[in-house]
Amino acid sequence: MAAHAQQMHQVRLDLCRRLVEHARNHTTDVAAGVMFNRVSAYTDPQRYEAEMQKMFRGMPVVACLSTDLPAPGSFRLFEDVGVPIVVVRGLDNQVRAFLNICRHRGARLVRETEGSRKRFSCRFHGWTYDTQGRVGGVAQEEHFCGAIDGFKHLIPCPAAERHGLVFVQATPNSTMDIDAHLGTFGAELAKLDLNVHKRVCAQDIHATCNWKYAFDTYFENYHFSFLHRNSIAPLFVNDIMLYDTWGPHHRVVFPPKDIIEWTRQPESEWLVDTLGTPYFIFPNTVIYCGALTPDKLFVNMMRMFPRGVGNLITHVETYGPVEVADTPEYQAEAASSLEGIVRLVQDEDYDVTSESWKNFLSMPPDAEVVYGRQELALQHSHQCFARAAGYAIPEIVAGQKTTAAA
């Protein structure tokens, strides 16, 4: 086993032990009660705008993996929250983010999605900037009468690199405390060894529903036996799950059908390294650590971005260990796996959420949805979404119903 896989092997082994204990006792992780949430949490345009401002632009959001900026001069555009940003690794190896806007007359500075440069030159009037955002040259500068010193730097946005991930906060000239945002979750992310994974393939998925409603399908296996009866239901148990939280972040684990056999086997026979482990980085990123086969690990990163109160795009990117990511065999298997994931999400999960979200628009203003005890990840997530957006936090109740104000 590769050295970078040993930590995750131990993490998965500990999770498998918890799953086997649940299987033996016919139990599962559950919430203390049920939770009711206003349908307006999914349909209110004002709430959507608050989420965009306070979460997607006011919090650290994953822009890419560190390996997507592999060398000094590497850059990548990040425009998914409605703010034009270029993220670049400087010649000093530090990651920075700037508005992708020339300071002269506001032209778009970088047009390629990604690449590598030591200088960025505006095609409009030729102003040139280095990887630290500093002006390196102004055509006919003498005509500006020495009055442009305040214009000789691109407008920065906070950026930080942690645990193989690059975070950006899409509010210009703001401050970001990435360590406070991640908290103790940072130590868990460090175990994923994302800095030794390289991007292999990627696809986008679109849906016509609220972004939170689409995310709901990622966080519970209650629907597996019904919506996915002919796809993943034969592979997973739908009445056992593990749930761990670190502030607003979480990990949810769904056991394979093999878990029943594992209860009768010694640990040495468990297929520990095939256990899928999804990690949710608040507010919009899922890092799924899985395996094509027991010896072929991969990481899927799914980043969901709203395009309106009832539209979204999900970027799905597959990363493989650097020692095998460039081999034709691994790339073919990874591409096939990614295609299966995209087809499952697009044709089943997003199909039903797009249909159901439209139904919300016909419901009374005070209508509610309910999350059961087995949907504890939805309960926790929606409480965190509401808190971050500045709305009343739905309560978890047992035995009787209470409603949070809209």
Image (cartoon, rainbow, N blue to C red):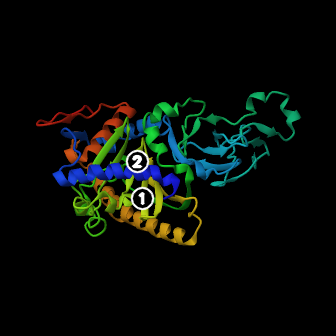
The correct choice, above or below, for 11 with respect to 237 in the image is above
Say if residue 48 shows up in the picture.
yes
Q: In the rendered view of the protein, which quadrant contains the C terminus? A: top left
Q: Which residue is mark 1?
A: 290
Q: Earlier in the sequence, mark 1 or mark 2?
A: 2
Q: Which residue is mark 2?
A: 279
The residue lying furthest to the left in this view is: 399
Residue type at numbered disc 1: Gly
Query: Which image quadrant for residue 395?
Result: top left
Image side of residue 193 versus residue 256, left or right? right
Label 2 packing within 10 angstroms: few (<14), some (14-19), many (20+): many
Query: Dot 1, crowdedness within 10 Å: few (<14), some or many (≥20)?
Result: some
Label disc, if present, on residue 310 of the rendered structure? none
Q: Residue 283: horizontal and vertical position, in percent?
A: 42, 41
* Image coords of residue 120 (percent x, y): 74, 47
Q: Is residue 267 above or below residue 155?
A: below
The residue positioned 46% from the left and 56% from the top of the image is 300
